[in-house]
Amino acid sequence: MNHQFGEKPKKMSEASQRLGEEVADLIFAAVCLLNSQGLDLQSELEEVVMKCAHRDRSRFKSDEGIGS
């Protein structure tokens, strides 16, 4: 990812990587960590979504739409 978005140049011997693949690796690792700790991904994700929705409830004006 640093090759695409950072300053580190890719070595000729390194395989190209896709952003989607990198994100999928992160999600897989997070799921494995949650499972190993006996945590429920759905519950944790719902809590975070509610927290962000509450925190950002007045961040944008209601009349602002996509492309405005």
Image: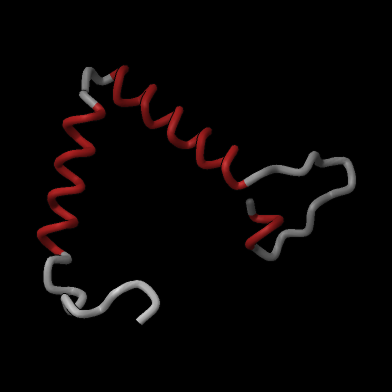
Name the quadrant of the C terminus: bottom left
Residue 54 occupies which quadrant of the picture? bottom left
Could you tell me residue 38's position as x and y percent?
22, 17
Could you tell me residue 45's position as x and y percent?
23, 38
Instruction: Name the foreground residue: 56 vs 68.
Output: 68
Q: How is the image coloured?
A: secondary structure
Q: Is residue 66 above or below residue 28?
A: below
Could you tell me residue 35's position as x and y percent?
30, 19
Instruction: Name the foreground residue: 60 vs 17.
Output: 60
Left/right of residue 57 with respect to residue 30 in the rendered view = left
Q: Give the number of marks.
A: 0
Q: Is residue 41 above or below residue 55?
A: above
Q: Is residue 60 above or below residue 38?
A: below
In the image, what residue occupies the spot 16% across and 75% down?
62
In the image, what residue occupies the spot 29% across and 74% down?
65
Left/right of residue 7 with respect to residue 58 in the rendered view = right
Residue 8 occupies which quadrant of the picture? bottom right
In the image, what residue occupies the spot 65% across and 55% down?
2
Left/right of residue 25 with respect to residue 68 in the rendered view = right
In the image, what residue occupies the spot 59% across and 37% down?
21
Left/right of residue 31 with respect to residue 17 in the rendered view = left
